[in-house]
Amino acid sequence: MKIKETATIVSQSRISAGIYDMVLSAPGISGEAAPGQFVNVYLNDKSRLLPRPISLCGIDADRQTIRLVYRVSGAGTGEMAQMCAGEKLEILGPLGNGFPLEEAAGKRVFLVGGGIGVPPLLETARVLYESAALDEEQSDVIADEQRVSEKSDGVNAKTRTTEVVSVIGYRSDCFLKAEFDRYGDTIIATEDGSTGTRGNVMDAIRADGRKPDVIFACGPLPMLRALKTWAEEEQIPCWVSMEERMACGIGACLACVCRTREIDGHSQVKNTRVCKDGPVFNAAELDL
Amino acid sequence: MGAKNRLGVNIAGVELKNPVMTASGTFGSGEEYSEFVDLNRLGAVVTKGVANVPWPGNPTPRVAEVYGGMLNAIGLQNPGVEVFCRRDLPFLKKYDTKIIVNVCGHSIEEYTEVVERLADEPVDMLEINISCPNVREGGIAFGTVPSVAEKITRACRNVAKQPIIMKLSPNVTDIGEMARAVEAGGADAVSLINTLTGMKIDVNRRKFVLANRTGGMSGPAVKPIALRMVYEAAHAVHLPVIGMGGIATAEDALEFILAGATAVSVGTANFSNPRATLDVAEGIDRYLEENGIDSVQDLIGAVEE
């Protein structure tokens, strides 16, 4: 269910050049949202009509907050960056479809992010890591019970747990990296080579040598294209989160479309709606 | 609302429960907004443009924000009239509101094909879009030359079973002349304004912001122009006028009604406030209550001359 609510800013800080970290009290949306979804932020300066679609970097249903990590790229996000704790913003969400977490269960998942595509992967990493930890506890309990009841000779068919590997690319400053480190291995690429592999995320993936069972990605189009090509060569299922200029954010105006290989369900023309049918798509279905 | 519905209006014989409708292209076929808006409470839903076959629309970026408004160059992406009839009309029929289908085409034949296809469908009115600035053929080409506008109006009128509303372009020298041309062609109503052709350039990249280079401008910044044109059109013809262009509040809507509009459409405001249509309708009702006015019809064209 989509909820429009007046959210109160709990905190805001600048975490890198032009990158801001805003936590909002949003009791409705925080209870509904999932990793990879986004919210529409309606600005208070009404000369700026269009909502800003911003992905969720964190969702805390217990504290009833959501976290937005965004880049100042114009007057609208500039207005947001000037705001302080206690001020209010109208928001609508959760919007779109998030990452298909069930596809990663019990597998090695690469979360591949570039630039301002990194933030939505943090919540994805957290949820995958915590559900994997939970699965591990439960499977240990089951294994113990089996040992007691069957007095088995130690053959333990313990199910494999989800392994989260975050592959993140930056220009230079690795914002959010420390938080990704909590949820699994982190592979870093920087354009200037200051951290990790010099180059982009594809360079870092090659340098690391590991291969994933499944990929979730968010970042600039050239990165997604390269990743899609690689995933197809390696026959790895790959989901990508797309970005496009939006207006309504709910699938009505058809501003934010991306090309699909097959006829799309809504308009039947190989142009699917990023806001409503995405932003996360199976890369195999897109014509990037 | 009292026993007599003071918000009711009549357009070409069609009774609307209130004068507030959606502006084509901003509201899809209603489904997406039905989470926020009780469609039963709208005077009418005006659908996004429907062509004879699916249209892919323009490349992206398709939208850009400008001061107090926005530009769009969607290019009338739509699934075509068959899917529309099979999927969207049954959805809309579940609601107690009037259905107005916006019709687009590249040629007179394409327009009339859609109009004929809709003749026996549960549609209350047709809005013929001769004013979209974002398609190369058809669209605005039909809406800027009076003789062509008259011809296409007549062609649609000849095959339509529902009243036809001709949607006029503001990108003309004399809106009154265009309104008279479609009246001569047999239009049952006119709606205006469609968007004003505009442009935006990114100075850092030195590129057009829209892939289509130009786009249609809408939003609060165009309202004074729209209002002037609605006033002129209302004085040029004896047809009901549906006014639109930057309406975001009840006060905006009342300006258009006082200028001569029988009904109004809310468009771009849906993007900044998904409930905008209902806010406008409720605000008009409140205005009538506070001013002791029995019917919104008493306000149509009632600005003091």
Image: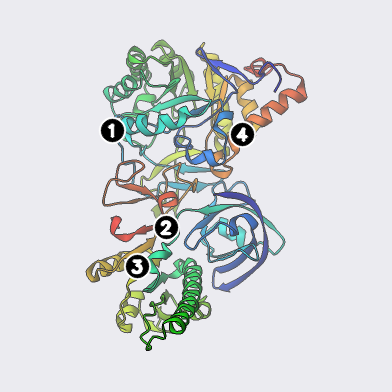
Q: Split into 4 quadrants, where in the image is the N terminus of chain B?
A: top right
* Alpha carbon separation for disc pair 4 and 2: 31 Å
Q: In this view, does A265 lie to the left or right of A164?
A: left
Both labels 4 and 2 in a single chain: no
For the point 60% across and 71% down, which residue is it? A14
* Alpha carbon separation for disc pair 1 and 4: 32 Å
Kindly identify which residue carries mark 2. A243
For the point 30% across and 36% down, which residue is it? B54
**Mark 4 crowd level (few <14, some 14–19, many ≥20, 10 Å Cα):** many
In the rendered structure, are the residues bearing label 4 and label 2 in contact, judged by CB atoms less than 8 Å apart? no
| Residue B15 in sight from this viewpoint | yes
Both labels 1 and 4 in a single chain: yes
For the point 64% across and 26% down, which residue is it? B255
Query: Label for residue A140?
Result: none
Kindly identify which residue carries mark 1. B53
* Alpha carbon separation for disc pair 4 and 3: 43 Å
In the rendered structure, are the residues bearing label 3 and label 1 in contact, judged by CB atoms less than 8 Å apart? no
Protein chain holding label 1: B
The mark total stands at 4
Residue B191 x/y as whole percent: 49, 23
Kindly identify which residue carries mark 3. A223
Query: Label for residue B278?
Result: 4
